[in-house]
Amino acid sequence: MTEGCFNKSIYFFGFVFFTLVPIVANGAFDKAVTGFRMKSLFKPKYILMFVLLGGLVLAGCTGGSAPLRGWSGVAASGGNLYLGAMDGRVVAVNTANGSLIWTVPVVALPSGGGGFGCAPAAAPVAIYSTPAVAGDLVYISGYDGKLYAISASTRLSTDKYLRKDDKSSPQPIIGSPVVVGGNIYTASSDGVVYAKKTVSLNDVWQFATGDKIWSSPAVAGGTLYVTSFDKKIYAVNTADGSKKWEFKTEGAIVSSPVVDGDTVYFGSLDRNIYALNAADGSLRWKFGAGKWFWATPIVHNGVVYAANLDGKVYALNTESGQKQVEFDLKKGERKDYGISSSPVMVDNLLIVATEAGKVYSLDTVNNQQKQVLALGEKVYAGLAAADGKVYVHSAKDRLYEIEVSSGAKRELNIK
């Protein structure tokens, strides 16, 4: 690290503890976050927020890419797994033998001065997004503000900044891209959703929200749904990028929406999960929990399963929002570990990983919960499932395959 970058780091942490901490403690960060205490800032979930916010401040030290280790989710497709490693590589892994098929480094090149005296230098790009796979192409978003398209057969890659001026002022991308038809949709922390052509990555349209977007869009029936830090969810026409409707909550939203039938579900930092009419955005119901909703909800057999940072998973009736059961996964924990990783469904079992690295199966038929195993490593990235197995990318940059029926664990090679 250069002297300039070191000084910039000092400025950032001074900013956090002498500016952000008092603001949050006084409730100015968000009116919805009530009962906040200074000691709460040192819990894992708040550290996650500060790490991401810190990346925005420190981005100049590496020519646009922050010195972070992103926690990419896993995509399963055609017997292979795809993810972003924490050293800035996109990797493909064979599920049959667990071997590394290929790896493509994602590196941010120097692009001028970094600010605060930082010398620009090439550096690995942090990847928080889960890849999207369409045919031979693997798409992934980078913290450097670029969308990458990698050929699974040739390893050749193309990339484009989402904005034309991003080369000098890149805007980090946290959420995952979504491919539907001939378009790919990506949302950025500049608060804009970008629709681009899948092969050329040429622009189709843009839609601006009022604040940062850390979530991933959801597309269904010619409509794109996206949540924003401006406390709103938007419905956007995929044909031309025009707004259909918007709905405002009482808190910033980082949870990605999910659409089931004629209803869209999402969680908010106001501690509620919402069900809206997908056609007009009218409220059908909302349900309040103990803490923030970060993970993406799952809908299965007339029930919405919503994981919360209070360490619980709430099972809610899709029609009424009435709670049918709650699964307490933090019970017995020595620390207050919540759930930020998005779960997956395997047959009738909901598989959930807590931040503490414990993996549970929740039987949606008899509402019984069972600990499958304890990884001993923290988990923030979303899970993936294929052929009765679940794949977990841990915070130690290890990829595990877990057999749901037996709890057997196998580490796959991503190095």
Image: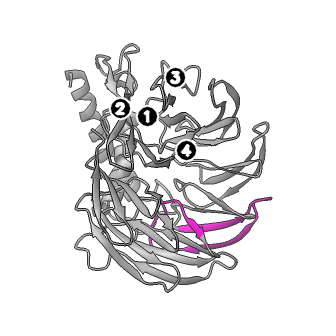
Provide the secondary structure element on which disc 2 rests: loop
**Which residue is found at the position 48% from the left and 49% from the top?**
76
Please give the range of residues in magenta. Answer: 272-299
Callout 3 touching callout 4 (CB < 8 Å): no
Q: Nearer the viewer, residue 202 or 225?
A: 202
Residue at the disc numbered 4? 213
Q: Quadrant of the N terminus?
A: top left
Asked whether residue 413 is in view, the answer is yes
Q: Nearer the viewer, residue 277 or 155?
A: 155
> Is residue 226 shown above or below 127?
below
Callout 2 touching callout 1 (CB < 8 Å): yes
Residue 11 occupies which quadrant of the picture? top left
**Which residue is found at the position 36% from the left and 42% from the top?**
70
Q: In the image, residue 23 lies at what x, y percent?
A: 40, 52
User: Which tag is nearer the camera, tag 3 or tag 2?
Assistant: 3
Residue 84 occupies which quadrant of the picture? top left
Q: CA distance from mark 3 to mark 4?
A: 24 Å
**Which residue is found at the position 45% from the left and 68% from the top?**
308
> Is residue 220 shown above or below 31?
above
Q: CA distance from mark 1 to mark 3?
A: 16 Å
Residue at the disc numbered 2? 66
Label 1 crowd (10 A; few <14 / some 14-19 / many >=20): many
| Comes first in the chain, label 3 or label 2 | 2
Q: Is residue 198 magenta?
A: no
Q: Is residue 281 magenta?
A: yes
The amino acid type, in three-letter code, at marker 1 is Tyr
Residue at the disc numbered 3? 158
The amino acid type, in three-letter code, at marker 2 is Ala
